[in-house]
Amino acid sequence: MYRLSLIILFFIGISPVFSQSPHGDELKIDCAQCHNSDSWSMNYNTLQFDHDNTDFKLEGAHDNTNCIECHSTLVFDEAPSQCASCHEDIHSMSVGNDCIRCHTSQTWLVDNIPELHEENGFPLIGAHSTLSCVDCHFSETNLRFDRIGNECINCHKDDYDSTQNPNHESSGFGTDCIDCHNPLGIGWETDFIDHDFFPLTLGHDIQDCNECHLSSDFSDISAECVSCHQNDYNESINPNHQTLNFTTDCVVCHTTDPDWMPARFDDHDAQYFPIYSGEHKGEWDDCMDCHTNPNNYSEFTCITCHTNPETDNEHNGISGYVYEDNACLACHPNGSESDGFDHNKTGFPLSGGHIGIDCTECHTTGNFSDASPDCVSCHQSNYDNTTNPKHNSAGLSTDCASCHTTGPGWTPAIIDHDFFPLTLGHDIQDCNQCHTTGNFSDASPDCVTCHQNDYDSTTNPNHISAGFPTDCASCHTIGPGWTPASIDHDFFPLTLGHDIQDCNQCHTTGNFSDASPDCVTCHQNDYNNTTDPNHISAGFPTDCASCHTTDPGWTPASIDHDFFPLTLSHDIQDCNQCHTTGNFSDASPDCVTCHQNDYNNTTDPNHNDAGFPTDCVVCHTTNPNWTPANWDHNDIYPLNGAHANIADDCAACHNGDFNNTPNTCVGCHQDDYNNSTNPNHIGAQFPDDCILCHTETAWVPSTFDHDGQYFPINSGAHNGIWNSCAECHTNPSNYGVFTCITCHTSSETNNDHSEVSGYVYESNACFDCHPNGKS
């Protein structure tokens, strides 16, 4: 019986290593830490599993919960970590399934309701701070807290609808209560309605809204002054606003001061006459002082204050002076005695014959402001009675100043003939020599109007047969005798070899209009007789200017060879070296056309065998001897690190076969992989993708994510206390085998675990209890 118990204990002790655990693959601890040999029942006295190392720490009420209440199956890692997995949602998903937003693991009681509301954008302040949850969140269970929105109207629609003083709905008030009501208060009282759209100042500072808002609809009141003050406007007598057609916009003259005073018409100074500034400031008390007719404010008086004989005496020697109100304003528009009226500052300066004339001679109506500056307003009879020339029949302008000055006798007179300048041969003093009809407005500026006979009679050349234009100015100046004459030959510049003075040398037909600008028209024979090169056989264009200038002898000639630049080795002066057929139009720009033999005879590398393209410019420039050559290896396999050191030795990797060279690590490094011993890559079943652990610079140092996948050796307690993989992995053929007890000897390790139940001095047991290498 004793031996049977030992056997049972032995197999229980090694069961985590040799049998399948019913608790899942992730639980790697000794069974004896939870169970004993008498029963599989949980032995809480020996339980050493630390739940804090999992993703779910046991805090509060969870610390006293029986394991089986959460771990309903034997596989412990199947237990869910979400609150709703274990706890029934009594709120019917109205607040989500994350219990810890409101509750803690200590208790279900909620003590942060104000904070929760503030997080959701609705702080519980003022009257809201004393309410119970169910006052706003109605439900049959009082435990479902459906969202009701953060806008006032969501809860207070009935309050809004039932208000009567004022009626919010008919007045068009907004539904955002805090526009008028204080959210910190406990009632609906308000003292901060934003009336900035119509400021309530001075006489408008009225506390009773109904004094202005006569109906229950607060939205239908107008901001226009006259909507409330029409009677005030109608009853005004000093001055009579209606009679004088004053504006009904009271703020133009009045403020919101009670009894309408003081009133001020600020625009009086700018529009009419300065009374708030200048010499008349403070010299009047009432509008009626100047405007004696309350029904017509366009009437005014100056001579009521500026009496005679004083005023007459002050104007002795002033031409045109009249003791009359309008005359006062005309000479003193700013009311200043020192700023006497200066006619030169108006739009009609007095000069010449206008100087010294009595004002009333021009201002016949007595109203100085309605005099017209137009010449004809005074001089219509002078215009009508002219005879040399007769202005009416000639259609001359009634603006006398366009030809005359203000000098007496209308002379001298100047006509602006710039539309047809009278210079040289046209400098004619007798107008009738050109204006033969006596009607000056119907004379044509066209040359042929006067010179048709001159045009028709030409013989050298004959203008009619040559098709020359009748616009004489296109070739002639207005000098007498039609000479010198110049033809604008810019459509075909006469330069160098074309600088020919005898027109007939090119215009052989005598018809100057049918000469063609095409080179071949004159130079067909030159084109046909070319031999170096033969232009016809070469298919050259007949547009000589494409290669030649107008220099005599056709030289120098230039061919635009930009479609195939002649640089470096291609800088060949003998065209026939490339154009071997004599037909210049059929030469191909493809490299291989000329360099097929160069391509075929390559050996380092053999371009044919390597399947290189026949487009030489992919790797070569036009440098002689094909060097340097450039191959963009990065597009196929970047040469970095140790690979860069052999970049010039293509054969090191390609061995003459450029098409079948592998581009994976193991394609070149299979022998390195096979011959590895520390560790043995084949035995350890390492992947053959070298880049996972090695760089392209060297095989060492190599990187392997041992810490993240298996056991921390480059961090933690084991960092820096090993040199070789073989120190822990003693079997180079199986890296699944490892040892801990090679370093952690039995005497020290046993002493360290003297109080640990179920302790076994064995490498797998070490790893089960210390998966991170911590003591």
Image (tube, helix red, strand yellow):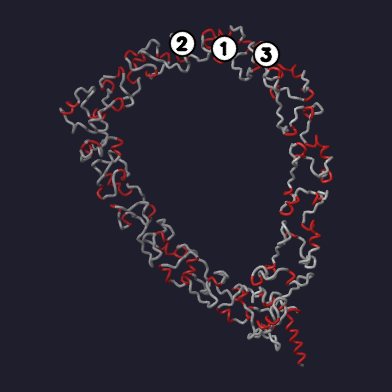
Q: Secondary structure at mark 1?
A: loop
Is residue 636 visible in this depiction of the protein?
Answer: yes
For the residue pair 461 and 738, the one nearer the viewer reads as 738
Q: Is residue 392 above or below residue 110?
A: above
User: Of residues 312 and 43, which is closer to you in this image?
Assistant: 43
Please provide percent x and percent y for residue 28: 69, 77
Q: Disc 1 designates what residue?
A: 485
Residue type, mark 1 in image = Ala
When the figure is inspected, residue 478 is found, relative to residue 99, above or below; the finding is above
User: From this viewpoint, is residue 692 visible?
Assistant: no
Q: Which mark is residue 427?
A: 2
The residue depicted at 57 percent of the width and 9 percent of the height is: 455
Mark 2 touches mark 1? (CB < 8 Å): no
Earlier sequence position, callout 3 versus callout 1: 1
Task: Give SS at disc 3.
Answer: loop
* Mark 3 burial class by Cα count in 10 Å: few <14, some 14-19, many 20+: some
Q: Are marks 3 and 1 in contact (CB under 8 Å)?
A: no
